[in-house]
Image (cartoon, rainbow, N blue to C red):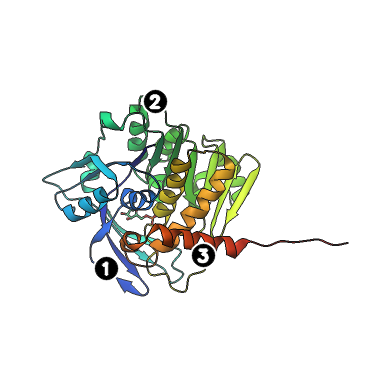
Amino acid sequence: MSLIVVGTMAFDAIETPFGKTDQIVGGSATYVAYAASNFVKPVQQVSIVGYDFPESEMNELKSRGVELEGVEIIKDKKSFFWSGKYHLDMNTRDTLVTDLNVLLDFNPKIPESYQGAEFLMLGNLDPVIQKQVITQLKTRPKLIVMDTMNFWMDIKMAELKDVLKLVDVLLVNDSEARQLSGEFSLVKAARSIMKMGPKYLIIKKGEHGAMLFNEDQVFFAPALPLEEVFDPTGAGDTFAGGFIGHIARTKDISFQNMKTAIIIGSAMASYCVEKFGPERLKEITREDISQRVNQFVDLVNFEIELKG
Ligand code: AMP
């Protein structure tokens, strides 16, 4: 059982109404790997970094069963850098800076040892590169899950629609679902996006949970009401890592099992937001994860008997 994860490994600078960071480690693939490695090993990482990406972070990932053969290191360039500022609601943010740096040269080559992976998680990245990865795989994985964001819809919509034809599950947030489909109703948006390729669609709604669509079925998972949200950065990627991690561990790609997977994704995301960057994800144990999943079960478990 193996999982390929593709995405950015980066530096972020984050501003929230409650605090501010200098450059800290981030990136879509970093968060996915920290989350997924709790459930599946190896995680076979595909990314690109510059000379400045900390070796200590690479070692931390390796110690969790993340293989880095597919991570290219460019000796004379800087890593991808992203900076964002959250609004008071902590659900919406403005991107302040996106410095592509090494991403401009990214031309991923899938190592031979990664071939035959059963699952593929395409983290948020240039859709052209996401497609390049899919087409290099000699055997199609059992499930291809893809994340993206408004940034790529703004500048590479045609390329994004092209790669959508090749994937099974798409993850977007509510405003991105509206932008991609041109529909305001999320039900109509889901129907329209599922015609673009993915058979399953997950729409994330930040602190308001996530919805899973497949044909005419829909399932809703809440987000855990947290007393404090410190930094929402990476919550979407962490959700994706928990989701695909659970699917890869169980090897079950049914809608029923995806329901469990979005609860697990939500539980992982709830940890991510408790500290800046991926720090909190490094502290938690399997026991913590089980406890939090149980909190989700308690949150939504009820029985109704309609009389009369
Ligand atoms: P999330 O909060 O889950 O949307 O993910 C935030 C992470 O995505 C940050 O750690 C950034 O480094 C990374 N990121 C931001 N913009 C992009 C982009 N355009 N392409 C790929 N990764 C990005």
At label 3, counting other C-alpha atoms closer than 10 Å, the crowd grade (few under 14, some 14-19, many 20 or more) is many
* Pick the front one: 50 or 93: 50
Vertical position of residue 155 compared to residue 10: above or below: above
* Pick the front one: 212 or 142: 142
Give, as a three-letter code, the residue at label 1.
Thr
- The location of residue 230, given as percent across then percent down, is 38, 70
Please identify, in this view, whether the residue under mark 3 or under mark 1 is nearer the observer. 3
Residue at 37% x, 46% y is 124
- The location of residue 250, given as percent across then percent down, is 48, 41
Q: Is residue 207 visible?
A: yes
- What's the CA distance linking mark 2 and mark 1? 42 Å
Where does label 1 land, which residue?
Answer: 21
- Which of the labelled discs sits on residue 139, or is there none? 2
For marks 3 and 1, the one nearer the N-term is 1
- The location of residue 285, given as percent across then percent down, is 37, 59
Give, as a three-letter code, the residue at label 3.
Leu
Indicate the secondary structure of the residue bearing disc 1: loop
Q: Residue furthest top?
A: 138
For the N terminus, which image quadrant? top left
- Which of the labelled discs sits on residue 224, or is there none? 3
Q: What is the tally of numbered marks visible in this picture?
A: 3
Indicate the secondary structure of the residue bearing disc 2: loop
Indicate the secondary structure of the residue bearing disc 3: loop
Residue at 20% x, 51% y is 59
Q: Determine contact: label 2, label 1, CB under 8 Å.
A: no
* Pick the front one: 88 or 259: 259
Vertical position of residue 162 compared to residue 29: above or below: above
For marks 2 and 3, the one nearer the N-term is 2
Picture quadrant of residue 116: top left
Picture quadrant of residue 249: top left
At label 2, counting other C-alpha atoms closer than 10 Å, the crowd grade (few under 14, some 14-19, many 20 or more) is few
Give, as a three-letter code, the residue at label 2.
Thr
